[in-house]
Amino acid sequence: MPPLPVPTAQDGPHAPDGSEEYETRHVHQVYEHIASHFSATRFKPWPIVERFLNDRPTGSVGLDIGCGNGKYLTVNPNIYMVGSDRRSSNLVRIAHDRKIQDSFVADALDLPHPNTRFDFAISIAVIHHFSSPERRVEAVRRILATLKRPNAAGENGGQALIYVWALEQKSSRRGWSEGDPQDVFVPWVMGKQYMASPASNEPTGTSSCQEDKEQQETPKEVTYQRYYHLYRKSELNDDVVKAGGVVIESGYERDNWWVICSPSGGNPAA
Amino acid sequence: MKILTTNYLACAVKTCKSEPAAFPLHFKDAELAREELELNPEFIKNVLPRIDWPALAQTAAELGFTTLPSQKPENLDEQTMKDLHTLLMETQVMEGKLVCGNCGYEYNIKEGIANFLLPNHLV
Ligand SMILES: [Zn+2]
């Protein structure tokens, strides 16, 4: 696949302007490039996610919003999951090969689902790619809107597990900690062996990329930059409340903040 | 695109969300394929109460499955269980379109993968 005009290490970082175009350039187009390499590094489910999925009763129907290569779709064979992703149609194609579940291309802010039908949802390492506080809260609100509402006693509502990258990860090789900037570019060094890989049946209308005319003769390593918002402690929980949800459980796992939440009773969140 | 999934799909356009005509979406020029999968009786039994039956009956009729009972079955005999498994889990729409009955927007399905991204003027 030829290099496309997406941000690479040569480009300086640009401050997020909170627009969808910004995310297209600094998130979606990058994933479209790195899909096969990215997928090859994403095979082991995180323990919290695995536990959440295995806790769902048989016959539960849920969503994986931002399913990437679909590694979570097969954790529990007794539930049904519908995966969607808009970052990369190449990733969705990898997810779709996982037979027993289903997946398609959709935007997390324009999900093609009726409200209040789902037993559960997961959104793992996705909403940290939204580039304004409003869009991040809106993403949570849209996830909550798909879930079954709790009964009058506040029970049996659908549950969502949301997972985002933490600002506080002093022990990671990136070394970020409290007080550091929260809007960052994170490099992805694309290995040579993935450069020529074809995952390129350019699917229906998902990418506005144009091929770079100055395509290099021999592929070499390329560094791509992805935009991330790093969440500080309690920020994700606050966003859930702003989105009209209730936090059931939350915590920190390996450089990430996570929350299990539910819609609150009363009026639908959307 | 599995038929069980279509029971959980509505138009992605915001103004369609609360319109009854935006659910279920309607198939157009659908090409079907069947892939055999192992039957999971517990799963079928538990997923049945979750299904919107009138929507499923409509989708099934549009795709030419005429044997589906018009009411949600109370008890699952072996044959009904198998039929449901075939329809919900094994049948796939490989090519075609899903059309919103409210706004008329058509979502493409190619090689089994639907695309629900909206053009800018509909976002
Ligand atoms: Zn519509």
Image: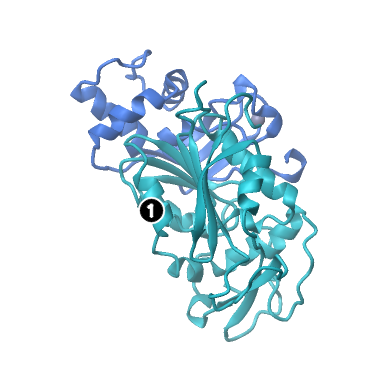
At horizontal 47% and vertical 35% (from top left) the residue drawn is: B30
Q: Is residue A123 left or right of residue A236?
A: left
Query: Compared to A209, does A225 lie above or below?
Result: below
Q: Position of residue B9 (x, y in %)?
A: 53, 33
Q: How many marks?
A: 1
Report helix, strand or loop for mark 1.
helix
At horizontal 77% and vertical 77% (from top left) the residue drawn is: A12
Question: Hue of chain B?
Answer: blue
Q: Is residue A207 left or right of residue A15?
A: left
Residue A58 is at least partly visible in this image: yes
Q: Is residue A177 left or right of residue B41?
A: right
Q: Say which chain tag 1 marks.
A: A
Q: How is the image coloured?
A: by chain
The quarter holding residue B119 reads top right
Question: Hue of chain A?
Answer: cyan
Q: Amino acid at mark 1?
A: Glu
- Quarter of the image for the C terminus of chain B: give it: top right
Query: Compared to B66, does A68 lie above or below?
Result: below
Q: Position of residue A257 (x, y in %)?
A: 55, 57
Query: Compared to A27, does A132 lie above or below?
Result: above
Q: Position of residue A130 (x, y in %)?
A: 68, 55
Q: Position of residue B100 (x, y in %)?
A: 61, 29
Compare residues A104 and A140 and report the one nearer the observer: A140
Q: Is mark 1 within 8 Å of ligand 1?
A: no
Residue most extreme to the left: B78
At horizontal 68% and vertical 70% (from top left) the residue drawn is: A185
Per the image, the residue denoted by label 1 is: A50
Residue B107 is at least partly visible in this image: no
Picture quadrant of ligand 1: top right
Mark 1 crowdedness (10 Å alpha carbons): few <14, some 14-19, many ≥20: some
Residue most extreme to the top: B71
- Quarter of the image for the N terminus of chain B: give it: top left
